[in-house]
Image (cartoon, rainbow, N blue to C red):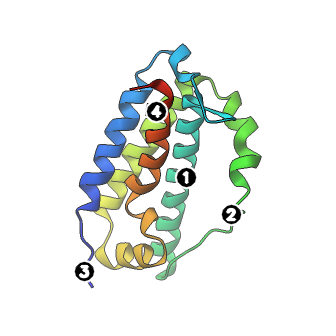
Amino acid sequence: MSIDRQFAVLNRASTERIRNIARLSDKELLTPVGEHWTAAITLAHLAFWDRRVMVVLDGTEHDGKVFVPEIDILVNDLSLPLWAAIPPRAAATIAVEAAQDLDERLEKCADDVLEAVYQYNPRWVVRALHRNEHLDEVDAALKV
């Protein structure tokens, strides 16, 4: 199977959405998104998970097989107080940087690495799938 590199277009579009939200004022970045999150927390969350995929790619390239870091499903709840402590502007900057870095890394990745990672979890390659779920929630909270 050959990896469909169309994921790059989807990922770059979701990164542009992150960039647009990152341009909001600090007050707007504090807009509640759901019960416990804000737009800024959403951005910090996305940055965290994009950085996780970087670790997956590093390990997969190094080991020659899909590397799956042991991360408990509760990481979001455990990380929430830390993400909330990040100033909104810093969360926005971190999210844009993480998304851009991962987009570039995925686009340069060898097909065999991408295929192996994609087979394990498509959301680790098509980051837009995860990003857009949360960005849609932010847009709805902001009434964009």
**Are the two marked residues, 3 and 1, in contact with CB atoms closer than 8 angstroms?**
no
Q: Residue at x 29, y 75 (%)?
A: 111
Q: CA distance from mark 4 to mark 2?
A: 29 Å
Residue 87: x and y, percent? 62, 23
Per the image, the residue denoted by label 4 is: 140
Per the image, the residue denoted by label 3 is: 2
Frontmost of labels 4 and 3 is: 4
Left or right of 28 on screen, residue 85: right
Q: Residue at x 50, y 78 (%)?
A: 66
Q: Nearer the viewer, residue 106 or 79?
A: 79
Query: Which disc, if any, is residue 61?
Result: none
Frontmost of labels 1 and 4 is: 4
| Mark 3: amino acid | Ser
Residue 76: x and y, percent? 68, 49
| Mark 2: amino acid | Ile
Query: How many other residues sit within 10 Å of disc 3, few (<14), some (14-19) or many (≥20)?
Result: few
Per the image, the residue denoted by label 1 is: 49
The local secondary structure at tag 2 comes to loop
**Are the two marked residues, 2 and 1, in contact with CB atoms closer than 8 angstroms?**
no
Q: Name the image quarter holding the N terminus.
A: bottom left
Q: CA distance from mark 2 to mark 1?
A: 11 Å
Per the image, the residue denoted by label 2 is: 71
Query: How many other residues sit within 10 Å of disc 1, few (<14), some (14-19) or many (≥20)?
Result: some
Residue 34: x and y, percent? 62, 36
